[in-house]
């Protein structure tokens, strides 16, 4: 059982609240066609998926990425306007987020904004995933400036409804002020061997589950239920669990589907609770 340091009222998802998927970045659609096609399947409890061509939008529109982006955009439109969705996860459809690499605060502001404009113009993305986001207090002013500008760009575009969505890809617990700089924070990204004994910061109890995401690799099929229980107790509303790992030459365990994808989709479906 993981060591949970938050007070009891922080365990906001210990009931039957709905989890959903955030996909930190599948491989290129040519290399991962099944993965991208699966995201657009009706009923997939997808919150968002990240499009990353070359650590950003690339130098020109990619036809395969344009096709994948179009399918996901159409699936979201059907989920939002095609009838009465059966729960709030499906009603949210699935946003496509553009990948912006902050390089722990080392990327120039102008470069990031240029990449953001390309994502909006070419792929009609519905928000941004800010990878390698700083975690310390000293980096917060620059991140707030960036997220404010990105929200303004999304508001001006016709591709992002509700002002778009910004996700900070810290991968660990950041300084609490970052919670006011974006819509969601990735507060864990790493192996199952660390996650099952992880601790949740007490300040996260002040926010609802939709503000936090956890990405865990190397989760055995036999521990799926335990992993979801930890996510709920630690107050994460968005997850991505995979049995893939970063060994055996696999540089990015999140680039492909877990072998138990259909099982985890069914576990997160309507009526699943602890």
Image (cartoon, rainbow, N blue to C red):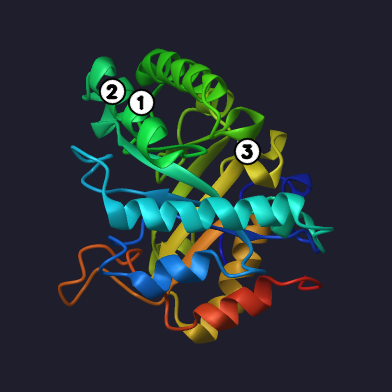
Pinpoint residue 146: horizontal percent, then vertical percent: 40, 19
Question: Which residue is found at the position 65% from the left and 67% from the top?
Answer: 229
Which residue is at a point 38% across and 26% down the rendered structure image?
136
Q: Judge depth for marks 1 and 3 and give the one in front.
A: 1
Residue for badge 2? 114
Residue 196 visible in the picture: no
Q: Which residue is mark 1?
A: 117
Callout 2 touching callout 3 (CB < 8 Å): no
In the displayed structure, would residue 65 be above or below residue 160?
below
Residue 264, image x, y percentages: 58, 76
Q: Are marks 2 and 1 in contact (CB under 8 Å)?
A: yes
Asked if residue 137 is positioned above or below residue 267 in the image, the reply reads above
First in sequence, mark 2 or 3: give its number. Answer: 2
Label 3 packing within 10 angstroms: few (<14), some (14-19), many (20+): many
Q: Residue at x 80, y 60 (%)?
A: 85
Mark pair 2, 1: CA separation: 5 Å
Which residue shows up at 63% across the image and 38% down it? 204
In front of the other: label 2 or label 3? Answer: 2
Q: Is residue 128 left or right of residue 107?
A: right
> Label 1: few (<14), some or many (≥20) within 10 Å?
some
Q: Are marks 1 and 3 in contact (CB under 8 Å)?
A: no
Measured along the vertical axis of the image, is residue 138 above or below residue 260?
above
Front residue of 269/57: it is: 57
Q: Marks 1/3: CA distance?
A: 32 Å
- Dot 3 corresponds to which residue? 204
Q: Is residue 157 visible?
A: yes
Q: Quadrant of residue 172?
A: top left
Q: Quadrant of the C terminus?
A: bottom right
In the depicted view, which residue is nearer to us: 35 or 137?
35
Residue closest to the eye, 74 or 243: 74
Label disc, if present, on residue 62 of the rendered structure: none
């Amino acid at each position: 059982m993981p060591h949970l340091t938050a007070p009891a009222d922080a365990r906001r998802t210990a009931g039957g609240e709905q989890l959903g998927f955030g996909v930190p970045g599948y491989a290129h659609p040519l290399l991962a066609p099944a993965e991208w096609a699966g995201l657009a399947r009706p009923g997939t409890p997808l919150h968002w998926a990240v499009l990353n061509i070359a650590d950003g939008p690339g130098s020109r529109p990619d036809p395969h990425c344009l096709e994948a982006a179009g399918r996901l955009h159409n699936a979201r439109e059907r989920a939002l306007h095609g009838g009465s969705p059966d729960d709030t996860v499906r009603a949210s459809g699935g946003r496509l987020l553009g990948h912006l690499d902050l390089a722990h605060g080392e990327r120039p502001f102008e470069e990031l904004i240029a990449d953001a404009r390309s994502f909006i113009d070419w792929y009609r993305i519905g928000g941004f995933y800010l990878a390698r986001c700083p975690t310390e207090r000293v980096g917060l002013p620059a991140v707030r400036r960036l997220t404010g500008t990105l929200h303004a760009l999304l508001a001006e575009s016709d591709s992002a409804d509700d002002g778009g969505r910004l996700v900070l890809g810290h991968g660990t617990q950041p300084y609490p002020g970052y919670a006011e700089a974006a819509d969601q924070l990735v507060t864990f990204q790493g192996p199952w061997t660390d996650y099952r004994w992880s601790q949740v910061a007490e300040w996260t109890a002040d926010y609802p589950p939709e503000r936090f995401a956890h990405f865990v690799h190397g989760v055995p099929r036999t521990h799926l239920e335990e992993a979801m229980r930890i996510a709920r107790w630690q107050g994460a509303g968005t997850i991505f669990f995979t049995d893939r790992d970063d060994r055996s030459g696999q540089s990015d365990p999140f680039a492909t589907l877990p072998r138990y994808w259909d099982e985890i989709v069914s576990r997160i479906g309507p009526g699943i609770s602890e």
